[in-house]
Image (cartoon, helix red, strand yellow):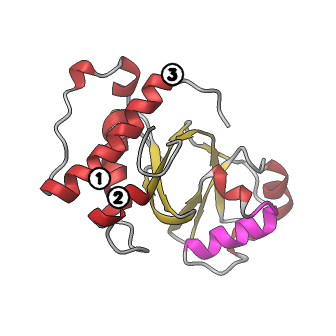
Amino acid sequence: MMPPRLSPDERSLLLELARETIATRLREGRMPAVGGDYLPPRLAEPAACFVTLTKDGALRGCMGTLEPRWPLYRAVMENAAKAAFGDPRFPPVTLEELPELHIEISVLSPVRVLPARTPEEKLAALEPGRHGVILRARGLTATYLPQVWEKLPDKELFLASLSRKAGLDPAAWRSPEAILAVYEVESFEEPEPGGLV
């Protein structure tokens, strides 16, 4: 994991923004109005992030960007909305579910392509628990956040699962043409489902 660059107050503000975005979309059908004037300067800097929603410990939605597209505060809002309403793996979140949702935000470091080409080089270059991994092969792309290592600690199983997520056969990562890139995250989450306490 990369060293923290956000203060506890900045983290809390981003988590509140993510929850408020989902709540406002559910209740009013729009994004909340946020003025950049009152935000800490770091939250206005461009950054890539993912927003992960869980319910009763199970994934309920996860969406993000790998490259900075927006200021961090807006990236959190956009990805919170996409995780809640645009993740094709799940139906849209409902108002009844809102109190049961748990929100985690992962802010990404810059992406670095690994020079590794052989399966052995690729396996040696990966650091479980630290690296988020992007697989690009045959025009398809998929990523796993570093947190996924907790469920898939074996490097080969991790890469086989990532290959399947990309819509490829499990051995696709072994191809010399398959490119691996890595990043680190600063991740933080709500202390309790339903928001900050």
Q: Which residue is mark 3?
A: 7
Extreme front residue here? Answer: 197
Residue 11 % position (x, y): 46, 31
- The residue wearing badge 2 is 98
Magenta segment, prevailing SS (helix, strand or loop): helix
How far apart in space, not on screen, are marks 2 and 1 (Cα)? 8 Å
Q: Nearer the viewer, mark 3 or mark 2?
A: 2
Q: Residue at x 43, y 39 (%)?
A: 196
Residue 161 painted magenta: yes
Give left or right: position of 75 versus 58. left
In the rendered image, which residue does mark 1 sit on? 22
- Say which residue appears at 55% left-offset and 78% top-offset: 167
Name the residue type under label 1. Ile
Q: Residues within 10 Å of mark 3 (few under 14, many from 20)?
A: few
Left of 134 or right of it: where is 158? right
Q: Which residues are the magenta region? A: 152-166
Between the C-alphas of marks 3 and 2, the distance is: 26 Å
Residue 15 appears left or right of 167: left
Query: Residue 80 in the image: x percent, y percent?
Result: 36, 51
Of pointers 1 and 3, the one earlier in the residue sequence = 3
Give the quadrant of residue 135.
bottom right
Decide which of tag 2 and tag 1 comes sooner along the chain.
Answer: 1
